[in-house]
Image (cartoon, rainbow, N blue to C red):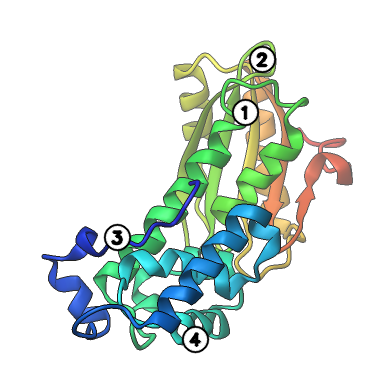
Amino acid sequence: MTHFAEAPSLFADHDDVTEVLPLAKGKVPSYMRDHRKRLRERFLSGGAAAIPDYEMLELVLFRAIPRQDVKPLARDLIDTFGDFNRVLSAPATQLSTVKGVGDAVLLELKIVEAAAHRLSRAKIMQRHVLSSWDALLDYCHTIMAHRETEQFRILFLDTKNTVIADEEQAKGTVDHVPVYPREVVKRALELNASALILVHNHPSGDPTPSDADIQMTRQIDKATKALGITVHDHLIIGKSNETSFRALGLFDDAG
């Protein structure tokens, strides 16, 4: 993503553009054109660190709304959801409640979100887990930290502790996700995995493990040990930090 070129033709024949905001007739006003040019140049010269969240969001919105001032919408989205990351990860149903957000805007936001997920995931796949631990944590936060419901994922590792698969195993509610140890073991055997890293999120933002989290982890650890499969860790992802079962010593008396 090296530039955010204005592309009137991208949605020129698409009704979504008019649903987002009515486009002004004629050319883009010079003040708006100059603002967009300056913003793009500042981003290209200084990168993301050179601009605040709402201006980063403007760069994304330029493509969806080619001939309107998108600064008010960018600010509204940041005010509503908190920051750039939360805007991208917000459910489409919630984004649509913000005035000015239509299908074209939703499409651009979700494309950027999907790209972020793929880039983050690429940094851990087929990599040794210990040498890419920070990237692994970044990936988990990228895809899970802002979810409104619990998700349970498993990273499957081979004998060299290289990540061979990353899969969502279950979705849940705001405070619970059903996990079945037999299904975890079954999938690990199908992939010929030698080790696992369990990951789930707490939508509340607090990554402190619950009694149910601990009990579930110990059940999985016991089931996998019987087949020679190691559970390296269980990570709980919060809004801005995470908890490691291994670091807390919660595997010491497991099984």
The earlier-in-sequence mark between 2 and 4 is: 4
Q: Residue 158, position in %: x, y?
A: 61, 15
- What amino acid does circle 3 point to? Ala
Q: Nearer the viewer, mark 3 or mark 2?
A: 3
Of helix, strand and loop, which one carries label 1? helix
Location of residue 31 by image quarter: bottom left
Q: Which of marks 1 and 2 is in front?
A: 2
Report the residue at 55% width, 69% height from top.
38
Of helix, strand and loop, which one carries label 2? loop
Q: Do the residues labelled 3 and 2 touch (CB within 8 Å)?
A: no
Q: Residue 227, position in %: x, y?
A: 62, 16
Tell me the residue that label 1 is attached to. 223
The earlier-in-sequence mark between 3 and 2 is: 3
- What amino acid does circle 1 point to? Ala
Report the residue at 25% width, 70% height from top.
103
Q: Judge whether 161 appears above or below 122 on screen.
A: above
- What amino acid does circle 4 point to? Asp
The numbered dot on residue 7 is 3
User: In screen coordinates, is 237 left or right of 252?
Assistant: left
Tell me the residue that label 4 is attached to. 76
Q: Distance between the residues labelled 3 and 1?
A: 55 Å
Give the farthest residue toward the front: 30
Q: How far apart are marks 1 and 2 (CA)?
A: 9 Å
Of 160 and 38, nearer the camera is 38
- What amino acid does circle 2 point to? Gly
Q: Quadrant of the C terminus?
A: top right
